[in-house]
Amino acid sequence: MNATEQNLRIDYIEFPAADLPATQRFYQTVFGWQFEEYGPEYTSFSDGRMTGGFYQADGLRAAQPLVVMYATDLEAVESAVRAAGGAITKAIFSFPGGRRFHFTDPNGNELAVWSE
């Protein structure tokens, strides 16, 4: 993708994390993300399509942007989130266009996963 096509699109996203190793384990286990560490206070991730990072933060805010990921098997991902220590904050529910659930990672970041 060239710079014109990338203009005004989300290019990278960052999350605060109180425990970087637990964060890496969680996202590697549930979603298969790859990580690259940049010192003790920052790690970047790639999910194969999107990149971002987690930075060390002791005081995490409750309200943050909601990142929504897509999954072909919603129930399997919900089970994987639970098994990896994530907490389901909204069980699978229907909305116009599909179904989704919300969860929090080990740092309390809330994300969602949807499917058609």
Image: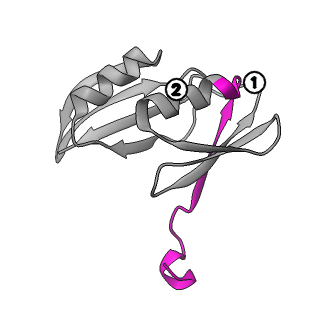
Residue type, label 2: Phe
Residue at disc 1, secondary structure:
loop
Q: Residues within 10 Å of mark 2 (few under 14, many from 20)?
A: many
Q: Which residue is mark 2?
A: 26
Foreground pick, 32 / 56: 32
**How far, Cα to Cα, is label 2 from label 1?**
20 Å
Does residue 56 appear in this view? yes
Whether residue 110 appears in this view of the structure is no
State the image coordinates of residue 109 (x, y, percent, origin top left): 55, 29
Would residue 94 be counted in the magenta stretch?
Answer: no
Label 1 crowd bin: few (<14), some (14–19), many (20+), radius 10 Å? few
The residue identified by callout 1 is 59
Q: Is residue 52 left or right of residue 111?
A: right
Q: Quadrant of residue 96?
A: top left
Residue 35 versus residue 29 in the image, above or below? below
Locate residue 111: give its quadrant: top left
**Quarter containing the C terminus:** top left
Q: Position of residue 93 (x, y in %)?
A: 21, 28
Residue drawn at (28%, 42%) of the image: 71
Using the image as rendered, state which of residue 87 and residue 42 is in the foreground.
42
Q: How many marks?
A: 2
In the image, is residue 83 above or below residue 24?
A: above
Place of residue 7 in the rendered image (x, y in percent of width and height, measured from the top left) = 54, 76
- Which residues, given as a range, are shown in magenta? 1-21
